[in-house]
Structures are given as structure tokens and as C-alpha cells.
Image (spheres, helix red, strand yellow):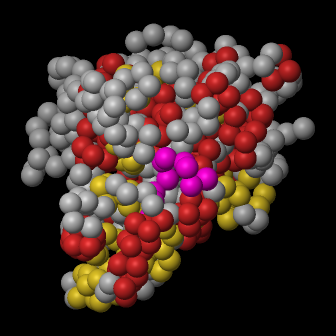
Amino acid sequence: MLARINRGAFAALAAAAVVGGIPAAAVFADPSGHGGDHNRHHGSAIAHVLLISVDGLHQSDIEWYASQHPTSELAKLAGGGAEYTQAQTPVPSDSFPGMTAQVTGGNPRTTGVYYDDEYSHAVLPAGTTSCAGKPLGGEVIYDSPDDKDETALDAGQGLTGLPGSILEMTAHPHSLIIPAALPVNPQTCAPIYPHEYLKVNTIFEVAHAHGLRTAWSDKHPAYEALEGPSGNSIDDLFTPEIDSNALEPSGTPYPGEISWTGDNAATMQYDSYKVQAVLNEIDGYDHSRASKVGMPAILGMNFQTVSTAEKLLSSDGLNGGYLPGTTTPGPLVARALDFINAKLQAMDEEIHAQGLAGSTAIILSAKHGQSPQDPNSLTRIKDGPIIEAINTAWEAVHPGAGALIVAGVDDDAWQSYLSNTSQQAADFVKSYLWNHSATGVAYDGSSRALAHSGLSEIFAGKGAAKYFGVPTSDPRHPDVWGVVQAGVVYTGGKKIAEHGGANPADRAVPILVYAPGAVEPGVHGHPVETTQIAPTILSLLGLNPNALQAVQIEGTPVLPGSTHG
């Protein structure tokens, strides 16, 4: 990952965004979106929607795999459902805004969620206990550092016998988050939990308001954010910590004490726990299979296996990423796609075994893609020295001013949050970046110099606000946003791909909606967005998509051809 600047300072600014956006009374007046019986369309054939998000999955991966394996589950979903070949994620293409889009129907300008480690000029730093008169600004981290124990798969719950006992993990991971790690609301001086930071309601809240059961599985307890402002809309939320120390099935640590993303076999093992949770839910149990509760109306999970196969230079003796000079999956990515296909098939077969095929829709998409696909275009650039140089240059002309860039997570975009939010300060950063030549490392290990710090476009101050579609007073958007030249990844490590930016490969993900008898099969080649998944899910369930606040604000339409009658 690229450098994360001044984590403590970053956390302090982010919470302010919560109080600096849409007035709470206007947005949260009815977070459930429950407006009465008119919100439900009677006669819907679909009673369950299984939503599967595969981090890093490209539309081109689906097309390649279906052509190579025409009888596969992925080919079946693509050929037998509505396939949207020109789907895109929001920008930034990070996991947090990417998943938020799928369950709210909104982009960051509406949801207020730009990254899993962002900054807000309207909060106080994590750990603040005396708020009166404190300057605003802090980092908003909704990631593994929030856990009671980020090294443990159960995030600090205290389970014995891990990893085999992980299905016993709580369905309410809110309890595993450390309040002192959260940004602070300057008005109440209370920590801002992830679900409280979200500005709009979610599909889980709408479904819950109609008495429908909900479930989800993701990679950090901080994904309790998906419950929305009400904070209690996912009945069964299973969130084993992916950044924890990976353990062999026997409980022995993986060599090198890596996390679950440090080895692709470990990632597959990790994802398999979530798959088992979903299979248990399809069978009508809770994720641990301890209680019979009925199959949820909305359920699903996020896969990480494809993402790590794309990022790792090699793993398990296989080269990661795509074949040089092409966008054809290399051996590790091909194996990862085999894994995804097998697990999707297992879920589909379980749906049929339970007699639920006629009442269950399957939606497949991705929080984000990954860039670059062609490793020959890769240039790894260390962003830390560039940030340091900008701050030094600023302090040279503004003695005593301190660091200008106080936070940012760059990945394959440039995001800077500034201590001075004037247009002059933003333009200073933009000018430095544009006039600086950066030297990086190519895929083959050679040096490569790129103009403009590796960027193709830079938006600063008012320009950045306009880029994201928010007023300049919005406290959450990056003060400086840069679109990288294709292939640039800001890292000092060996990863060969990343996400978070606005490159086509970051955003070009699949959307498949499979529900025979309810959704007409066909290929839709006009542009759509992953935000359209949320209203589509409600429509399939016979609920009113306009119950979603982001749908009202942005006018997010249901996916064309995805609903029956």
C-alpha cells in the first residue's frame, strides 16, 4: 500500500465530515426508508437476493473465463442472466465506497464515504475526550486498526481453537470495535461509529423495516457501516479480520507471519469461511449454523481471492497478475477464478437443494477492479518522498506553518488532505506535483521516469470539489485529487496492481443479475453503475427503490431489464 500520512492527524479530521454534510434531520429523519405499505410491490416472485462481490474482478475476466469454460457456473450466470458489459464503480474505486455504493445506490458525494482511511475537516481526532475549543480535522479510519485485536481472525473476540472456530464469531461485530480508535463528533464529543458516518440509509435498513431478515459477510468489523445510520439492520454480520495473522487449518501461523492477503492460498482459505457462512444461511441457519432462523431476504459476501492474485508478484509457485503485454489472466489469477467459480457453483447448488431456485436472484459484481492489468505498464512510485518534499517546500515559504499535507492514501490515485484548505495551498500542491518528475520501478525491475509525479490530471481545491460534485465547503472530499498515468501504483513494495483510482481497469467491473423466470437473459451494452445494484435489489424483492435516500438524491435507476413486470 502506499504511504499513509500521519494516521493520528488523519483520523482527527475525518469525523468532522459527519457533522459537516447533509443536515442530520434532513437525511436521517427516517433512516429505514419505511414509508408504509406503498413501499412494497405485491406479487414479487423473488424472496431472496444473494449478492456476491469479488474484489478485483473485471468484466474482461468474466468474458475470458466463460470462453475458456463454457459450461462453468460463471458462464451460466453470464449467459442465463442479465449481463451489463459496461458497468463502472464509483470514484474513488476503493472497497469502502465501492461496497457502500452497492447497498445505498449512492456515490461518495452522497454517502460521504470516500475511502476506508480518509480525512474530514469536520471531526476531531480519535481519542479526543475534551472537545471544547479544539481545532477541527482528523483521520477517519474504518479498517482493521479499529479492532480490539487486529492480529486475530476474530478481531479480538477471544475465541479459542482458531481458525477452525471462526464461524462462532459474533454476528454483531460492533462490539469488537475500539471506541478510542474512532473519530470524534465535536458536537457530542462521542466517537463516530462507521454506521454513523454514513449519510444515507441502506438496503438492509429498508428490508429490515419490512420485517425481512438480512445477512452479510465482509473483511473487517468496520463493515458494520453497511447497517446504515440506524445501526441495527443486519441480523447476521460475519466479519473475520482479513488483516490478521494467517493461520493454517491446524492453527499454525503461515510462514513469515503474513496476513491472509500475503499468500493466495491463505486468501482462499479465508474466503472459504465466509462461503460456509453463506451456505449455512441458504440452509436457513445463522452463519454459525447454531440457530434455525430462515434464509435471509438479502444475504451475501465479499471475495478477496482474485484481488490478491492480481496484486501478488507470485504465490504458491505461480506468477500473479496478467500475462505481460495482455489482459489475459496469468496462472495465479486463473486459479483464483477457478476458486470463485467453484464456490459460486456450491452456493447455486445449495439454493437448488433447498428448493429456492425459483425465488432467489443472484447478483454478481465487484467493489472495484484493479490496475494495471498489463504488467508491462506498471510503474511503482514511492509517494512518501514526494509528500515530504512538498511539505518542506511549503514550510520554506511559510515558516512555522507546519506540514501542509496532513493525510492521504494514494494507492493508484493521488489524494491529499491539507492543513490549510485555501485555494492557494491546494494550488501549491498541484503545481509541485505537476512540475515534479518521479522515478519509479517497472515490472521488470528497471527504472522508469515519469513527468508530473506520475499523474495525468490534478484537481485542487475548488477543482477537486467540482470533480466529486460537492460544494467547496464539503469537509470530506480530498483537497487535492490526482488521476494517475495508466499503470502507476504508489508503493515502496512489490505489489503489481492496486485500486482506488479512476483508471478504466479500476472501474470496469461486471454486473450479472441471474433470476430465471424473473429477469430476462440478455446482454446490455450501455453504461451502468454499481450504484444501480441497490435499487435493483429492492425492486426484485418487491420493495420501493425510492425508499433509499441516495436513490432520491441522485435519481439512481434500477438496472435496465433486471426486473419482471
Q: Residue 415 falls in which quadrant of the image?
A: bottom left
- Residue 505 is one of the magenta-drawn residues: no
Q: Nearer the viewer, residue 338 or 2?
A: 2
- In the depicted structure, whether residue 175 falls above or below residue 504: above
- In the depicted structure, whether residue 277 falls above or below residue 526: above
Residue 210 percent coordinates (x, y): 70, 16
Q: Nearer the viewer, residue 115 or 98?
A: 115
Rendered residue at 42%/21% (across/down): 188
How many circles with numbers are drawn on the protein?
0
Report if residue 46 is visible in the image.
Answer: no
Left or right: 290, with 48 as reference point: left
Q: Nearer the viewer, residue 237 or 447?
A: 447
Left or right: 494, with 537 as reference point: left
Q: Which residues are the magenta region?
A: 470-483
Residue 492 percent coordinates (x, y): 21, 69
Left or right: 269, with 482 as reference point: left
Where does the N terminus fall, quadrant-wise? bottom left
Rendered residue at 73%/42% (across/down): 553
Report if residue 131 is visible in the image.
Answer: yes
Rendered residue at 62%/32% (across/down): 23
Where does the C terminus fall, quadrant-wise? top right
Residue 100 percent coordinates (x, y): 54, 42
Rendered residue at 20%/30% (across/down): 149
Q: Main secondary structure of the magenta part?
A: loop
Residue 225 percent coordinates (x, y): 47, 32
